[in-house]
Image: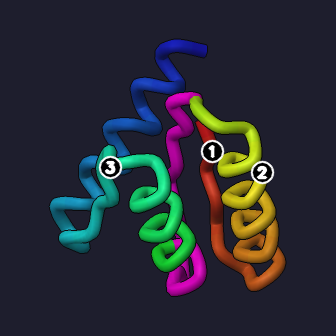
Amino acid sequence: MLLEAGRLVKTAADRHRVEERLLTAMEPEEGVDAAEHVIESAQQSLSVVFAGGNDQRAARLVTRLGRAVARGVDVRLL
C-alpha cells in the first residue's frame, strides 16, 4: 500500500510539472476554500491527499469530490 501511495504522490507531482497546477498546504479555511475552487474547476482528474484535520472541513471536500466524480472527473484520494 505504501508503494502505491508513493506512486500516487509521484503521479501528482509529475502532473503538476506538466499542468503547472498543484494545491499545497495552507491555513485550514484558506485551504478548504482554495481546494473547493480547484475541485469545482477540475475537468479531467484530481489527485488529493488528506493530511488530517477538521472532520467538517474534510466532509465538505469529500462531498465536492463526489460531485466531481459524478461529472466524470477521475479522482484519486489518499
Q: Circle 1 sits in a helix, a strand or a loop, which is it?
A: strand
Q: Is 78 positioned to the left or the right of 9 in the image?
A: right
Q: Quadrant of the C terminus?
A: top right
Residue drawn at (48%, 57%) of the image: 29
- The relative height of residue 74 versus residue 78 in the rendered view (above or below) is below
- The relative height of residue 39 versus residue 15 in the rendered view (above or below) is below
Nearer the viewer's eye, disc 3 or disc 1?
Answer: 3
Q: Which contiguous range is marked in magenta?
A: 39-52
Q: Is 59 positioned to the left or the right of 18 in the image?
A: right
Residues at marks 3 and 2, CA–CA distance in whole angstroms: 18 Å
Q: Circle 3 sits in a helix, a strand or a loop, which is it?
A: loop
Residue drawn at (52%, 60%) of the image: 32
Which is nearer the N-term, disc 3 or disc 1? 3
Which is nearer the N-term, disc 3 or disc 2? 3
Is 62 a magenta residue? no
Asked whether 50 or 20 is in front, the reply is 50
Residue 77 numbered mark, or none: 1
Q: Position of residue 70 (x, y in %)?
A: 83, 78
Q: Identify the amino acid type marked 2.
A: Ala
Q: Where is residue 67 in the image (x, y as percent from the top left)?
A: 79, 75
Is 45 a magenta residue? yes
Q: Identify the amino acid type marked 3.
A: Met
Look at mark 3 in the image and give the residue it sits on: 26
Q: Where is residue 54 in the image (x, y as percent from the top left)?
A: 65, 37
Q: How crowded is mark 2: few (under 14 residues within 10 Å), some or many (20 or more)?
A: few
Look at mark 2 in the image and give the residue it sits on: 59
